[in-house]
Image (spheres, helix red, strand yellow):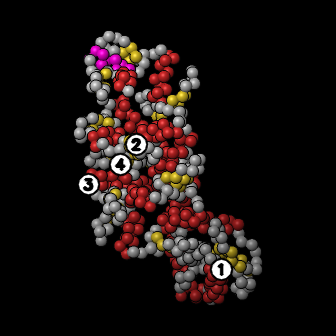
């Protein structure tokens, strides 16, 4: 005899009268069920509705009614219903214990000593099991579909304003706050607002002082995991962000973004007062001290104040005579690295700054800026005594010595003083006999470059200086100046013995011989 039993966890007294043994079967099945559930680490099944049927016995009305109610409840949409099928031969259920096999995609089947289970019944149970699983799958499929976009780089949600793509619509909604300026999350302590809840959460550590993330190598603590990750690159030397133009690498993407402005010449931060533009916001903050006159950093020795700490540190080297930056070509030392960098271009011949109007190239940006005044005619530095204008402040400073009579540069050999260092350098050639400027035509040498230039007019017969009254030409400006005294009758050179005047110094020198 073949008996097919469907065991129900919801047992009724009426069924106990019909079949005396089921308690024994139920205990065995439940025991096996517990063993299976204990061995299954990942998968758990819930047994809700199971009934017992005997094929060779008449159905009790109460049990039939119970079965029909149970079958009505066993809808395909239920994801928690499992059918257990038991087949045996004989009236006694005391055979070997059912062997239960569990699978994600199949039913739970228990077989005792006897015939194999019917294939048709097996298929029905399999289909019921598959149906119960399929009802619980849509949510998982949606999550998997969203996750798969990470690997396929599919970005179905696109921002209409900037065109940036996102894998989830929720991320796009957060992104839109960048354009709208919406900041719905507010700090209750200081009132600062944020676009997302995570930023607010990280901000709260400013008030609490909490730094839960610690560096395993140096022990430094951080408020968020991202900052710790960036900090770790200091120890590993990792620089994952590289410039596509020059190849320079950076530890942070923000540093690369700021570096790109060197190539693009973008200056997004401007001074509200004068309109001057800068590549960084902190440069604007420092620049504002020019307008406010604020000088936070002062030197104790001389009391001079500076708007930037770096300027103070460089200034201190004037007092200590420290020159930490040395030229690898000539050994000259400098107080500032920028000065050394500009000096190196003398050896390399590099002139990276060209004039857009005439094409002349310069070694540094400041020299180009001063050169542009030649084209614009700008002379921003004026003498307060005579009103003369100058393109450079250094030229004004030298000019002021004409009015003050200051001659700070003295010759060590004869003691003669000079107002300019360059004039002293040329004077030294009188003592040394050095004549570094030679004529390419005749080989004559001169101590000054302007003397060579005047000499070259002899070979070229060029007379660029002409008299406005008689039209006579001269190769030197001084010769024209002396010639003009013939027309004006001016005689600025007088004899100390007889008082006779002469238009030229050479004529006075010849006259003096009469008295000697």
Q: Are marks 2 and 4 in contact (CB under 8 Å)?
A: no
Q: Are marks 3 and 4 in contact (CB under 8 Å)?
A: no
Mark sitting on residue 269: 4
In the picture, which quadrant includes the N terminus? bottom right
Q: Earlier in the sequence, mark 2 or mark 3?
A: 3
Element class at badge 1: helix
Q: CA distance from mark 3 to mark 1?
A: 77 Å
Q: Indicate which label's residue lies in the foreground, 3 or 4.
A: 3
User: Which residue is label 1 attached to?
Assistant: 39
Q: Quadrant of residue 292?
A: bottom left
User: Which residue is label 3 attached to?
Assistant: 292
In the image, what residue occupies the spot 54% across and 72% down?
Answer: 218
Magenta-colored segment: predominant secondary structure? helix
Q: Quadrant of residue 89?
A: bottom right
Q: CA distance from mark 2 to mark 4?
A: 53 Å
Q: Are marks 2 and 1 in contact (CB under 8 Å)?
A: no
**Residue 266 visible somewhere in the drawing:** no
Callout 4: 10 Å neighbours few (<14), some, many (20+)?
Answer: some
Q: Quadrant of residue 385?
A: top left
- Residue toward you, 484 or 493: 493
Q: Indicate which label's residue lies in the foreground, 2 or 3.
A: 2
Q: Does residue 281 appear left or right of residue 153 in this picture?
A: left
Q: Position of residue 444 (x, y in %)?
A: 55, 25
Q: Are marks 4 and 1 in contact (CB under 8 Å)?
A: no
Q: Indicate which label's residue lies in the foreground, 3 or 1.
A: 3
User: Which residue is label 2 attached to?
Assistant: 416
Q: Position of residue 172 (x, y in %)?
A: 42, 53
- Residue toward you, 65 or 133: 133
Magenta-tinted stretch: 479-488
Q: Position of residue 194 (x, y in %)?
A: 35, 62
Residue 79 position (above or below residue 383): below
Q: Indicate which label's residue lies in the foreground, 2 or 4.
A: 2
């Amino acid at each position: 005899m073949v008996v097919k039993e469907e065991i129900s966890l919801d047992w009724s007294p009426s069924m106990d009268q019909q079949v005396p043994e089921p308690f024994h079967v139920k205990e065995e099945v439940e025991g096996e069920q517990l063993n299976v559930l204990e061995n299954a680490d990942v998968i758990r099944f819930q047994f809700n509705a199971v009934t017992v049927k005997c094929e060779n016995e008449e159905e009790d009305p109460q049990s039939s009614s119970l079965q029909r109610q149970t079958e009505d409840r066993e809808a395909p949409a239920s994801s928690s219903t499992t059918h257990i099928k038991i087949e045996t031969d004989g009236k006694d259920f005391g055979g070997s214990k059912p062997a239960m096999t569990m699978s994600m995609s199949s039913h739970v089947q228990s077989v005792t000593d006897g015939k194999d289970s019917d294939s048709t019944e097996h298929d029905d149970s399999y289909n019921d099991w598959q149906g119960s699983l399929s009802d619980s799958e849509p949510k998982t499929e949606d999550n998997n579909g969203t996750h798969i976009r990470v690997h396929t780089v599919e970005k179905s949600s696109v921002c209409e304003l900037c065109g940036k793509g996102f894998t989830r619509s929720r991320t796009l909604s957060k992104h839109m706050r960048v354009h709208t300026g919406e900041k719905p999350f507010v700090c209750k302590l200081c009132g600062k607002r944020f676009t997302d809840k995570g930023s607010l959460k990280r901000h709260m550590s400013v008030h609490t002082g909490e730094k839960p993330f610690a560096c395993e190598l140096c022990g430094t603590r951080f408020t968020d995991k991202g900052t710790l990750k960036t900090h770790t690159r200091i120890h590993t030397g990792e620089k994952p962000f590289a410039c596509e133009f020059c190849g320079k690498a950076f530890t942070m993407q923000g540093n690369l973004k700021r570096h790109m402005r060197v190539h693009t010449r973008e200056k997004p931060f401007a001074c509200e007062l004068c309109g001057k533009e800068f590549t960084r916001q902190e440069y604007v903050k420092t620049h504002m001290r020019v307008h406010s006159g604020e000088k936070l950093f002062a030197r104790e020795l001389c009391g001079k104040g500076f708007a930037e700490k770096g300027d103070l540190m460089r200034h201190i080297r004037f007092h200590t005579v420290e020159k930490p930056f040395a030229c690898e070509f000539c050994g000259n030392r400098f107080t500032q690295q920028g000065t050394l960098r500009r000096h190196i271009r003398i050896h390399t011949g590099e002139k990276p700054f060209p004039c857009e109007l005439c094409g002349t190239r310069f070694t540094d940006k400041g020299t180009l800026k001063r050169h542009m005044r030649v084209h614009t005619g700008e002379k921003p530095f004026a003498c307060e005594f005579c009103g003369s204008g100058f393109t450079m402040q250094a030229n004004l400073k030298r000019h002021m010595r004409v009015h003050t009579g200051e001659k700070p540069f003295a010759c060590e050999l004869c003691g003669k003083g000079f107002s300019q260092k360059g004039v002293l350098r040329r004077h030294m050639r009188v003592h040394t006999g050095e004549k570094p400027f030679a004529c390419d035509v005749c080989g004559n040498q001169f101590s000054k470059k302007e003397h060579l230039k005047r000499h070259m007019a002899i070979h070229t017969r060029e007379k660029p200086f002409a008299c406005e009254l008689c039209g006579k030409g001269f190769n030197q400006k001084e010769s024209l100046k002396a010639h003009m005294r013939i027309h004006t009758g001016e005689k600025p050179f007088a004899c100390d013995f007889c008082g006779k005047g002469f238009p030229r110094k050479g004529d006075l020198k010849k006259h003096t011989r009469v008295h000697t």
